[in-house]
Amino acid sequence: MGKGIWTVYADIIVDISLEKLDKTYQYRIPEDLEKEAVIGARALVSFGKGSREITGYILDLSLEPKLAPEKIKPIKKILSGQTIIESELIRLAWWIRDTYGSTMNEALKTVLPVKQAVQAKEKKSVSLAVSREEALTLLAEFERKKNRARVRLLTELLEEGTMDYRFLTQKFAISPQTVKGLADRRIVHIEKETVYRNPVAKEVPGKEKAICLNEEQRRAAETIIDNMNRGIPGTYLLFGVTGSGKTEVYLSVIEQVIASGKQVIMLIPEIALTYQTVKRFYHRFGDRISILNSKMSKGERYDQYVRARQGEIDVMIGPRSALFTPFTRLGLIIMDEEHEGSYKSEQVPKYHARETAVERAGYCGASVLLGSATPSAESYYRAKQGEYTLLTLTKRAGAAQLPKVYVEDLREELKAKNYSIFSRRLKALIEDRLKKREQIMLFLNRRGYAGFVSCRECGHVMKCPHCDISLKYHQIGYVKGQGKLVCHYCGYEMPMVDTCPECGSKYIGTFGIGTQQAEEMVRKAFPGAVTLRMDTDTTSGKDKHEQILAAFAGHEADILIGTQMIVKGHDFPEVTLVGVLAADLSMYADDYRSGERTFQLLCQAAGRAGRGTRAGEVVIQTYHPEEYCIAAAASQDYISFIRQELSYRELMGYPPVSSLIALLVMSEVERYAVSFASFLADFVRKSCSEQEGVSCLGPSPAVLSKANDIYRQVVYVKGKKETLTWVKQKLEQAIRAAGRKEVTVQFDFDPINSY
């Protein structure tokens, strides 16, 4: 670190409460502490004008002093001993900032998301502070003086002993002042106990049957457990067909991790999956599990943070943000459905939970287990390159068989004059299942009522005034036309129009199909069926996911209609038919991942059928049955799909064979966004051209060229990952040097969605 030649300085944060994250202070690192003074280390420093000593954390190291060198104080000591979880998380924040591009403040707010000033919840109890004899004497005195409230209080305490404060004051009409008065006289004692909010509903753990893993499951679990017992952490990709019992493998490995005194983070891609996952884990591990998600209150989230730090939790379950649970004995991170795009943050810093999990696990010698029936191209590629250990489950668990899949060509349906959203085969199978009292899931990759609204006379499309995107029609009630137009980007709403604002025509039409319209059509076609709809609109309230899933699991409905959230990991044994109403919706998106996304969605949808003792059937409706992703999904042939997909990625230089950075340039003034995007593209071409394999695309308007009155331009840079990290650093320097405050630039490594 330049010992004896350069002076090294450390940027230290001295208070990690969220209110003060923006402020760091620079200290000089003495030569004898240089080896210990690493990013994330705790340091003892002198703070302020006096001689007060406080603890801080090193966020950055530099050779450049920010003040006159003689004014910069030295670090007094690097604190070692027991690992402090904030040190590990701050080190991880630095890695996120350096890898994905953001400010340190943004990265810290990501890894410490729940450390907020939330008032602790207290439980108070009241008990006698005097002997029973003294209490009886006082009771007689209060009776003589007709102090009725005091008489009631002492009578209850003499009879019951310790009582709940709230129950005592409300049930027996005893005022808080009465209790406080006796407490001040030391006649009673008020005891306060901090009660942590536990979002996991209390259930009596059932007597679960002893798990008997099949040969494939046992081999996968033993591989992971044996390596952990030998102190060999690793990253594993568990590739198992839908219904192969990946969760049983997770549970078996978790049991061993907990037995060894370690803790587990279980990541799930959707809040909607929490219901079944938590129920199963609770029956297995009791109240030593908890959850974290965005639907919880600040108080609930803060309490889980505290409980995790204090070691009261063994397993934390939740979406992406649960990755930053402050476990001090982390032994395993599991990512279920690891292929899901929700594991990539859409907010700055745009980190991916998979790479971040591997990085965090490396800090504490933990292992990472990635599970999927349709692994992401990145994970499968790395497994084939030897970076991950590949474990496979080729058969469904128990007696369950993979469902029979039909691909229905909607072009042929039109030729047969069938204009319904249901092919003839799907309609017949739905009628059959309703007669048998079996359940059905209908999947549509869209929410709302229709794709867009336009004038049939002049072609004018109703667009959001703040975003360059069409408004979607959402019906209110069941009277057609009584609805509203909604922007799914900024939330702008307006009533449904009767006439065209451009030409005045009354010929206004809705185009496309959404879940709301699909539900309406199901009710018309099958009037005796009970339906449930599950999409972003119906699950916006707290616990709505659980309510809908619990109702369907209890067979309170025959048909569940929904978007992607209904096909991800749910296990409903009564579902024997799955219908994919429009397989083409995701296939022709302006995105190099569209084929992979379509294949994954169709396989996941198909995997919901026949998970119990009865055989399942799947109907995929499409206008393009010949497409390789649809044909491979119909035959559940992941290997043939991924080989073709990776050859395409290699030919085009796309991830995972290569890497990609998207530079999103934004400004309230369009010409500023355009000019600065051009500047960045020119900078890459001129300053980074000597780097082998670097190419630049753009600039061009983003697909969503305007959102919330902000204009958006995009530049793409291709190259090897190590090279692009260097390019990003050069770009960050150029952006800082330009000092254009009216322009914002965001980096996105290997973007999941196109811009």
Image (tube, rainbow, N blue to C red):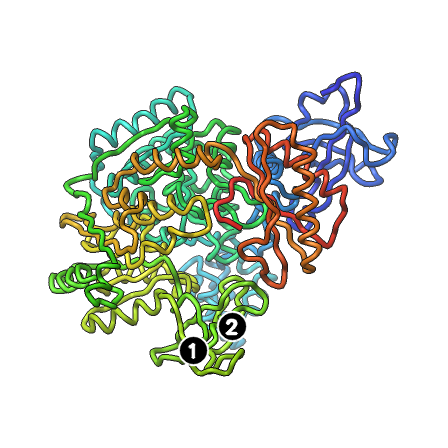
**Mark 2, residue position:** 493
- Total numbered labels placed on residues in the image: 2
Q: Say left or right for 512 vs 577.
A: right
Q: What is the three-letter code of the residue carrying label 1?
A: Ile
Q: Is residue 109 visible?
A: no
Mark 2 or mark 1: which is in front?
Answer: 1
- Which element is circle 2 on? strand
Q: Position of residue 94 (x, y in %)?
A: 62, 36
Q: Quadrant of the N terminus?
A: top right
Q: Which residue ends up furthest to the top in the rendered image?
A: 4
Q: Position of residue 604 (x, y in %)?
A: 30, 47
Q: Residue at x 76, y 41 (%)?
A: 737
Q: Quadrant of residue 524?
A: bottom left
**Mark 1, residue position:** 508
Q: Quadrant of residue 475?
A: bottom left
Q: Position of residue 593 (x, y in %)?
A: 43, 44
Toward the viewer: 216 or 10? 216
Relative to 348, residue 222 above or below? above
Toward the viewer: 55 or 652? 652
Relative to 119, residue 310 above or below? above
Q: Say left or right for 102 vs 472.
A: right
Question: Badge 1, how many Cα within 10 Å: few under 14, some, many 20+?
Answer: many
- Which element is circle 1 on? strand
Q: Say left or right for 530 vs 498.
A: left
Q: Position of residue 563 (x, y in %)?
A: 35, 58
Question: Badge 2, how many Cα within 10 Å: few under 14, some, many 20+?
Answer: some
Q: Residue at x 69, y 35 (%)?
A: 686
Q: Is residue 701 visible?
A: yes
Relative to 671, residue 501 above or below? below
For marks 2 and 1, give the CA distance. Answer: 18 Å
Q: What is the three-letter code of the residue carrying label 2?
A: Glu
If you read the primary sequence from the N terminus, does the residue marked by circle 2 or circle 1 appear first?
2
